[in-house]
Amino acid sequence: MPAESPRAQRNFATFWRLTLASVQGFSDQRLLGWIWWLIDPLALIGVYALVFGVILGVREGPEGAAYPFYMTCALVPWRWFSAATRRGGAAFQSNAALLSSTLVGRRLVLSSQVAAASLECLVGIPVLLVFLLVYDRSVTSALLWLPLPLLVLGTLVMAVSFILCPLMVMLPDLGNAYEVFLRVLFFLTPCVYSLERIPEATRSLYVALNPLAGVIEGIRRPLFDGLPPLWDALGWSAAWALLLLLVGHWMFRRLGNDAIRML
Amino acid sequence: MNEPSIPIRCSDLGVAFTRGSRRTMLRASLRRAFRALRGTAAGAQLPPDPSTHWALRHVSFTLRTGASLAVCGDNGAGKTTLLRTIAGIYQPDEGSLRVRGRTSVLLSLGATLDPRLSGEQNVLIAAALYGIGSAQKREHLAAVQAFSELDDATLQMPVRYYSAGMRLRLAFATASVLEPELLLIDEMLGVGDAGFRHKSVARLHELTAAARCVIICSHVVRFLRDHCEQALWLHQGRLMACGPANEVLDEYQAHTALMEGRRTPAASFGPLPPPETQGAPAARAAAGVPVPRAQVGAAAPRADRTPGGVAEATERG
């Protein structure tokens, strides 16, 4: 038998192999392959820019003409959140063959699915860069704040995936319910409009109750306005992320065994 | 003389499933999770519940290094549940299970390979899982390909396009080339052409000769009789007998013959015999009475084999 590598190295190799298989599995089965990862966000941005920017005449930011860029700054992280939680939530179901025949770390399986969805969303970054050039945006030091809201968003993605993953096996309806929830959440999150549109009297409550509000605004401000994130809003998002991560971790640990038996 | 090492020690093992609708299952799981949160029973002891179905209960046995164990029983006896619990996929709800060994592989024709992925991807995932570094992966892939006799083009195809025989070849080659210390095989070896069957049986003998353990679940009694020295008979989740393969399999066949006789039209509506606690296991199984624990034997080591050591021990239970 070939020499066995240390546990950490083995876990990373398994994680990477599963991630790669998931990404390749998607692209190999389609004629256009990975180009779909580019078509999908471009179509989304195009439709929203047409509906909100042209037909409804929404103007956001200091100059209304940059609305497509303004919206893209929010749509790219939104797509990451929605795609990664969808894929992470369905991790047990999509890897049922592996999980019911081999002893494999369940967190590894879930993380690999989230990582695969995240890799697919990375193509959103070139789109953002193109907009930076088109709208002649200067690179400011505020971009250095970006890792912070991205870290909070990543924590939220993992937390929601931990919660959904065992529950989706036990309750398949949850998949449909989550799709409806995402649609509602999208319009309740400041993606196609700014936080300033929320009446001032209820803005604090809005920010406190929507974990994504602070994160999306926290990513858009450094990118679009060259300003640091709104700290109170980002603080609420971080608090939600930590709370949901604790709940998710507990649920995943307690319900994981039962979920595997139902696969 | 040293005591031979015991890679599997199973004591009073119980694994339960919740029967009923998805809602019932979810409710039972949440109830257990919240009981654990409150610190009562730590979620391990299941409360009495009519929806609880014990797929395995009060199962005790030990397996020594280099043994080949057959697991027999009717459909729903708990064979696959036992293998999955040994593999660590299911956690015991009762009792304890200690498994020593660097690797254990569960083979099941329908489940081992991911049909969406190519054969090569499946092999590489298995290699990563069992700690084969990237430097050795090409060598490993070549070994799997040589054993399975599948060509390059086939290995690049998604597994869903494979025939049953090709899946078997790839799954068995992937598992056996890894040379696990414990190889678990679930209902697989009846498939495939005669040439590959012969080759895989020879491989199983090589593994047991190298002091590795093999556990085979099957309904093909003749195959089990030919290739296993010890046997374990499960009936409705209970251990009916455990010991030398020929004795246990004789009992099992007597039981199946008895059940076949009962299924004849004349006898199918007849009264069942009263449960008995004495008598042959076949008669007890027919009456749905498990074997008393005192009669449960342990799989003994083969006399002609020196026990091998375990390089790295893992323990579950």
Image (tube, rainbow, N blue to C red):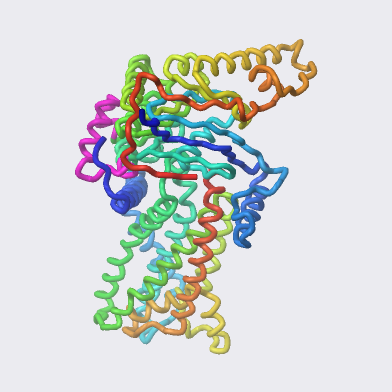
User: Is residue A34 visible from the viewing direction of this image?
Assistant: no
Q: Depth check: B34 or B239 in front?
A: B239
Left/right placement of residue A100 relative to residue A127 reads right
| Magenta residue span | B127-155
Residue for point 36% across, 63% down:
A42
Quadrant of the rendered structure where residue B183 is? top left
Is residue B260 positioned above or below A29 on the image? above
Q: Depth check: A196 or B44 in front?
A: B44
Left/right placement of residue A65 relative to residue B262 reads left
Residue A91: percent from left, percent from top: 46, 51
A137 magenta-colored = no
Residue for point 21% across, 38% down:
B138
Residue A216: percent from left, percent from top: 42, 75
Is residue B189 positioned above or below A171 on the image? above
Residue for point 44% across, 28% down:
B215
Left/right placement of residue A142 relative to residue B96 reads left
Residue A120: percent from left, percent from top: 34, 57
Q: Majority secondary structure of the magenta segment?
A: helix
Left/right placement of residue A34 relative to residue B62 reads left
B147 magenta-colored = yes
Tell which residue pokes out farthest to the front in this image: B1
Q: Quadrant of the N terminus of chain B?
A: top left
Residue for point 45% across, 16% down:
B223
Circle count: 0
User: Is residue A61 visible from the viewing direction of this image?
Assistant: yes
Q: Depth check: A132 or B216 in front?
A: B216
Q: Depth check: B252 or B199 in front?
A: B252
Residue A12: percent from left, percent from top: 31, 53
